Image (cartoon, rainbow, N blue to C red):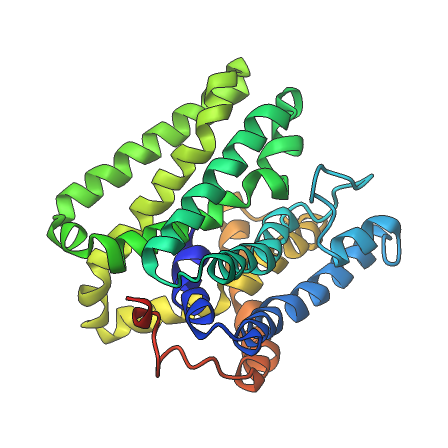
Amino acid sequence: MLSGYVLASQILFCVAEAKPKAFIIFLVRRWMRTVPAYVVALVVISVLFGELGSSDFCMYLGYVQNLFRQSTQTDYFSVAWSLSVEEWFYVGFPSLLLAAAALTGQRNIKSALAVAVTFLAAVALARFWFGDFSDWGAEVRRVVIYRIDSIAYGFLLYLLVQHLVPAYFARLSFPAVTAFLVTSTILVFWASAAISKHDSFLAKQLFPWLAALFGSGCILLALKMERAVASRGWLADICLFGGRISYSVYLFHMIFLIVLGSIQLAQPTIFRFVAYVAIVALFAALFYWSFEKPLLLARPRLAVAMRSARSLG
């Protein structure tokens, strides 16, 4: 959901521009941000598992290992499922918005809302009718065509908060947003427990929507706290640092878990956990400054700041 929210302005900008160049620049920027680091992590973990060059490796490389179902013989890079969802969303959802704009001639927020709602409904129906709920985790929850709506919910939230009913969200109090987040958290944990303990079909159906509510609560709480965090320089620096290393932490944490887990240590578990977190964070920081940041600086510019998506009206 966070990806959908933070990228919404760029996607809307591409629609407003109505030029292929803007969409191509958007994709190049996304791919330069996500693909190179992913390939490095994939190569490293493939070497560890002896899978470099295998059919499973090639599927991971093309982000197709979970496109319609979990197709790998060994899901040795399990965190990649959500990255496939992201990459296919970058290509698919903006293309639908552009196609709808070209067919209808409408490039405003209401038309974007109509496309988003239709897209969410279509994915939900596909999940209900065609999802293999007997193996829900591998065949539904982590499959691109059944979970690509998770990012679109973030896009929808952006439309509501920034364009359609901004005054309503501005009036929401901090306690109200906190209560919403706590409630959605409880519901997500309930659904997870009902699925794991009772294989509840209802909980499996509700989980994507409950997860979207939880993600919405997190984003809304962050928006409410933004000014307070920004006013405290040290806290803002910590948050910015966390944001910068978050992608490489997500990519590489499994690798360090495997490597460090194979080393027999006599220290208490809490010591090993703290050491693990510190090592992963240090590596992620070094990887960001030496590998990711140069690529980010080399990306072509998308002039969102100069002509924001508000031009859609």
Indicate the quadrant where residue 10 lies: bottom left
Nearest the eye: 137 or 40 = 137
Nearest the eye: 277 or 290 = 290
Q: Tell me: 12 left or right of 110.
A: right
Q: In the picture, which quadrant includes the C terminus?
A: bottom left
Residue 64, image x, y percentages:
73, 50
- Residue at the location (55% across, 71% down)? 23
Residue 87, image x, y percentages:
61, 58
- Residue at the location (57% across, 74% down)? 20
Most distant residue in the top direction: 198
- Residue at the location (35% across, 83% down)? 306
Residue 83, image x, y percentages:
60, 54
Q: Is residue 159 visible?
A: yes
Q: Is residue 280 visible?
A: no
- Residue at the location (88% across, 58% down)? 53
Most distant residue in the front direction: 104
Nearest the eye: 101 or 73 = 101
